[in-house]
Amino acid sequence: MSLPTFDIATITFLLFLGNLTVACILAIYKSGFGKVRSYRLYMAGKIFQAAGWPLFLLREMIPDLLSVQIANSLLFTGFICETFAITDADKYQKNTEKVFGILGLICLSTIWLLMWAAPANIKIAIASVLLALIFSTCASFLLRGAGISMLRQVLGVFFCLFSLSSLYRAGTSILSTSAEYNLLSVNTSQTIEYGLFFVILFISGIGFLLLLKERDDEILKESETFNRGLVENLPDLIVVYGYDQKILYVNSAVTGLLGYSSNEIEGTDIASHVPGHQQQAVHDLVQSRISTGNVRTVEFDVVMKDGKTRTVLSKGVPTQFHNQPAILTILVDITDRKVIEDELRRKTDEIIVARNTYYNIKHNQ
């Protein structure tokens, strides 16, 4: 039982429309990715392919220079840009520029040096081998390394299958005895190859965008881990509370000062940790920070687990915590400084009293 075959010219036209559509959609929804190198590469790849496919349809109607050399140069530049963009979107891949740069030189040199006077079936074989080389290289990058994601595995396996299909097409084209065998010939290997091209159009586009999101999520996670480690080890007291005035996060400096565990503090009202006579003022301060973004520094006391109090300076700024608006507050314990200031003030008062007493005694004699 033979596989069904399809009109290659129709599929080629659909590939032109598909690549053009993908490029337009990416151009419209470029928010957040416009400055990312892999995004620009992928866009360029789709534009090159959209420009190359129509030239194949015009074969026999335009010079071979356009329908063979120029068309293949555009397509293979597009394939290189697309596969490079996919590996570049994967943050685990490093220094892939040289590999894909060399692949590009190999492809373009082969197209211009070997495909010029070759028979049609040999041209197809050469192009198929080059395709297998490009997509198998991309697959090798996606499938290597420890702990690769399911998305990378799916893309890598699919590109491997496409590479095998390309090699099969190369073999059948070389062994073909038909003088009419050409790019638009309808046969099983051509149907498989062009059918997979059409599938790649969608899988590659969706996979590329998901890879970008996966990379951004991993970078964000690493950034959050780094920032949390940095905040945890700061000597200053860090408190994050939501707009409902419930504490969302405290660092180890806070738990060390107050004597509570983070689980005992998080979820409690921010004002519950100050003396009763200051609670309303703290509520008003928090509300002011939420409504106006007020970041002025204020002084108040905090109550420790043993009932003692410490004096702190507080400065809060708006932030986001777990995708919800919050206030990040930095507290500086100034209790010891205030003790010293009070002692200096007391000593100063004693000196002033002693000086005045001496002055009065001297002038009363």
Image (cartoon, helix red, strand yellow):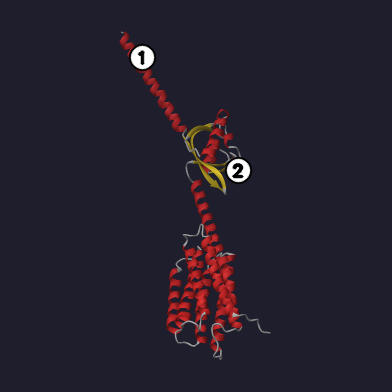
The residues tagged by marks 2 and 1 sit, at their Cα atoms, a distance apart of: 57 Å
Q: Is residue 105 visible?
A: yes
- Check the image and name the residue furthest to the front: 61
Residue 62, image x, y percentages: 48, 81
Residue under label 2? 263
- Picture disc at residue 357: 1
SS for dot 2: helix
**Residue located at (34% from left, 12% from top):** 360
The quadrant in which the N terminus is found is bottom right
Q: Looking at this view, is 302 or 219 the one in front?
A: 219
Residue 274, image x, y percentages: 56, 32
Disc with the residue nearer the chain's start (2 vs 1): 2
Tell me which amino acid carries mark 2: Asn
Q: Is residue 98 above or below residue 256?
A: below
Position of 84 with respect to 207 (left or right) is: left
Residue 122, image x, y percentages: 50, 86
Q: Looking at this view, is 102 or 305 the one in front?
A: 102
SS for dot 1: helix
Q: Is residue 260 above or below residue 147?
A: above
Residue 321, image x, y percentages: 55, 47
The quadrant in which the C terminus is found is top left
Q: Is residue 161 visible?
A: no
Q: Are marks 2 and 1 in contact (CB under 8 Å)?
A: no
Tell me which amino acid carries mark 1: Thr
**Residue located at (46% from left, 79% from top):** 66
